[in-house]
Every structure is written in structure tokens, then in C-alpha cells.
Image (tube, rainbow, N blue to C red):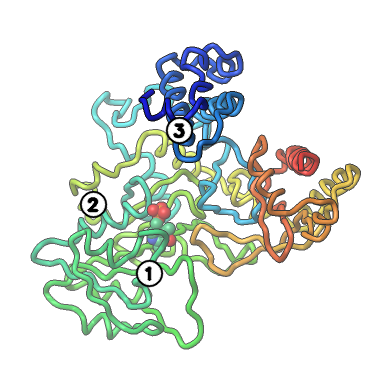
Amino acid sequence: MDNQEHRRGNGLRDLPSVGELLADPDIQHAADGMAREYVVQIARAVMQERRAQFREMQSPIDRDGMIAAMCARLMQQQRPKLRRVINGTGVILHTNLGRAPMSESAVAAMQEAAAAYVPLEMDLASGNRGGRMAEIERLFNLLTGCEAALVVNNNAAATMLVLAAVVSPARNAVVLSRAEAVEIGGSFRIPDILRQSGATLVDVGTTNRTYLGDYADAMTAETAAFLKVHSSNFRVTGFVHETSVGELVPLAAASGIAVIDDLGSGALVDTTAYGLAREPTLQGSVAAGAHLTCASGDKLLGGPQAGIILGQRVWVAKCAAHPFARAVRADKTTLAGLAATLRHYLRQDYSEHIPIWRMIATPSEVLRGRVEDWVRQLRGDGVPVTVTASVATIGGGSLPGETLPSFALTIHEQDARADGHSIDALATALRMGTPPLVARIDQGRLWIDARTVFPADDADVVRAVGAAWRAM
Ligand SMILES: *Cc1c(COP(=O)(O)O)cnc(C)c1O
């Protein structure tokens, strides 16, 4: 303590020492086996903050407050951030909640691969080195008809890699429709990705209409690729025309130009069977003759985060041989989880086992029944809840504007106010609960949409809402 602090008054003398803090039973309990050196670091940080606060505002040292702050800090260090959260938002591929939850068999496969040695790059029959992608390639070949496959960290990396692999200093022009120079999400913009991968962007057509002739006119000896990008997160309707992969392939054929199709969501199933718009599929892209097709693993495929590159053998081999491929390659757990996910499509049991497809496939009447149960139990406890028709969305930059009829538990702001509550405070209390529950606030109501809540979590929803209501 310096002289100036001494002169400022007695307050700082109330500051407990590190030793005193460490001896406190509440702090010892919260530290729960954490090594002493890290507990000391946290104690010093809390003391420093309190000292600074005292200097700035002369606020008296509150010993209990300090202990509580330190316990909170210790618990925050110990408790995993990525713990189970109940998604009551009705957004199925919720990017902020980690996109697609995975099937039990995919989780089991990832766990086994994580905990053990696995023949990642070994052929067990010969004992020789074997291809890292052999299993994934066999599965994708059967499901989509592609010749070869490569899996990387995510679709952003896949797009970056395929572009880097197809361009060369002498031949680096990539032709892209103006309608497809899109931004996918924070800081992922196709024109930027093009530049970063060493390509020169040649934009053709207009915002709403691009014809085959526009691509033909743009072709030069420097043209390396035609890039198609699926407008994953918005829709252009009205006076529009798009040139398909199928039309571009014959145009590219004679000149050795690559046709690249960035699909984004990577559906393997016909989405119209679930009352949704038609989302382009991986097998559709392969059948149309795309040389390289890119997609995400954790969007409509319902698997782990991954970037999937499918295509013709020579083009995929070019990608695999690029130095960037090693920098973004997928690990053993991702490959195991992705393979297990793909087997659901082989068995055609995805709508029972892959959570996002189970959510999409659940009839809304089933959801109504579950919400009625929640509401009956909570009304008994005096919580002013109502069963309300809702609309769930796919989210995650897939099927923009497409909705699924659903049912939700709702609480009106007026009803909450009548009891001295507010729906914003209730939403915060639900997020801070155990397990956390993320609700939606919309139209003056709090919504918990059943379509994105696992049926196994129904009892937790009732408990969470009851507890949050009572605690306010
Ligand atoms: C989502 C998306 C990406 C990015 O994929 P990530 O797996 O999130 O990296 C790229 N392109 C399109 C068309 C997408 O929809």
C-alpha cells in the first residue's frame, strides 16, 4: 500500500489478505480441488479490482461481497461453458447454440475415436499406410455418386481450399454471378474468400439475372473456374434467372475450367417431403456434373462441424495435394462422427435418429400435446402460461424464410406484470438456470417452442419455468 492510499482513509485496511481469502470455507468449497497457485491468481485479481474501485469511488470494502465475487469467479473457471442448454427458440440450426446436435450413434463413434487408438491412416488388412478419407469416400460415393471426397474443418475452409487448389498464377480468374457474391455470416464474404485464395473475381450478370451467355462472354485463357454459390440465407424472387451447374459443365468442358458448387447446407434428402422448399442436394450437384461440390457437415446433414468436398477424382486430388489441405484437415473424431451420421442415410433412418430431422419430421399435433402437458403442470403452480401456435424455422443459413408449424408455451408481458414480473427478467432467469433454457421474446410474449426441445427435456422445461417464476 502506498502513502497516498494511506492518506485516503481507512477503507483499504478492511481489505482481506490473500491468506484470509484462501482460508475462507466458501472459497475453499468453490475452489473444489483447483491448484493453489491458480486460486491465488484469482484472489489477487479480485483484490486488485476492489482496490481500484476504492481509489476511483471510495466505495467501502465489502468483505462478503469480495468473497462472493471470488466464489463466482472460481465456479466460472470450473464449470464448462459448453454444457447442455435447452433450445426453446424454435430455430432448429441455431448457430449461437452450436448448430446441429448429433445422433447417439454419431456421438458414440466420436467418443470411441477420441478415447482410443483408431486406424486413421492404416489399412488393417495389409498393415500399410491407408487413406485417411477411405471410409468417408466409400460412404459419399454410395450416397451421392461422387468419385472422391475430402473432409476439412468447415465449409468456409472447404471453399477456400477448392479455390486455392484450382487457381494458378497463370490462370486465376474465377467467374461468379453478381447474384452470388454473398455474405454467409460474420466476416465470410465470397468475394473476400476469392481474393484470399489467390483468385481474381470476374463478376458477371446482374443482381437478379445471370445467363449462360454471361459466363461464355467472360471466358478467357485465364479462366480457372466457374463458381456457383447457393444463396443460403436469403431469397431473391420475382424477375430472376440463374444459370445452373448442369448448363455450365458443357461450357467449361473443352477448356479445362472447373465448375465449383458451394451448396452450403448440404442436404442429402428431399426437403419437400417435409413441407419445405426444395433445398439443392449433394447428389443433385454431383449428378449435374459439378467438378467440386462443397457443403457443411453441421447444417442439414445433421453431423459434426465439417467442410465436405465431393467431386471428380482429379479435382479432389488437386485439393488434397494443396498445402492448405493439411492446415484445415478434419480430425479423427470428426471423421468418425460424420461417417456414423452418413450411415443413417444409408439405412434411411435419419428421421428417427438424427435430432434435426426428428425435429423437422415431428407432426405439430405431437408438439401441441407436449406443450399442453407443460402448461397444465405450470398452471397448477399459478404461472400464467398459454398454449400458442408458433412457427419454427430451420436457421443456420439454410432454407431462408421456410417455416414449420409448431406449438409453444407463452407468457404475455401483461400477465407477467400483473404478478410483478417481466418477461425479459424471466428470460434472463431461464438462461441462468440449470440447465439453461433459451427462450424467444417476440410480440410482447416469451415463447418456448416445443419443436426444438428434446422430449427428454420436457420435465426440465416445467421445472425451469416454475423455478424462474418463483425466484422473481
Ligand atoms: C454456411 C455456408 C458456408 C460456411 O460454412 P461453415 O461450415 O459455416 O464454415 C459457406 N458457403 C455457403 C453457401 C454456406 O451456406
Dots 3 and 2: beta carbons under 8 Å?
no
Q: Residues within 10 Å of mark 2 (few under 14, many from 20)?
A: many
Seen in the picture, residue 269 relative to 376 is either above or below; the reply is below
Residue nearest the observer in this picture, 8 or 176: 8
Question: Whole-percent x and y of residue 258?
Answer: 24, 65
**Quarter of image, ligand 1:** bottom left
- Asked whether mark 1 and ligand 1 are closer than 8 Å, the reply comes as yes
Foreground: disc 1 or disc 2: 1
First reached walking from the N terminus: tag 1 or tag 2: 1
Rounded to the nearest whole Å, what is the CA distance between mark 1 and mark 3? 45 Å
- Asked whether mark 2 and ligand 1 are closer than 8 Å, the reply comes as no
Where does label 1 land, which residue? 182
Rounded to the nearest whole Å, what is the CA distance between mark 1 and mark 2? 23 Å
Amino acid at the residue labelled 3: Glu
Seen in the picture, residue 349 relative to 266 is either above or below; the reply is above
Question: Whole-percent x and y of residue 116?
Answer: 41, 22
Question: Toward which corner of the image does residue 126 lie, by quadrant?
Answer: top left
Label 1: which secondary element: loop
Q: Residues within 10 Å of mark 1 (few under 14, many from 20)?
A: some
Where does label 2 land, which residue? 319
Q: Residues within 10 Å of mark 3 (few under 14, many from 20)?
A: few
The quarter of the image holding the N terminus is top left
Label 3: which secondary element: helix
Furthest residue to the left? 170
Where does label 3 land, which residue? 49
Residue pictured at 32% horizontal, 65% vertical: 190
Rounded to the nearest whole Å, what is the CA distance between mark 3 and mark 2? 51 Å
Amino acid at the residue labelled 1: Val
Question: Whole-percent x and y of residue 262?
Answer: 36, 62
Furthest residue to the front? 7
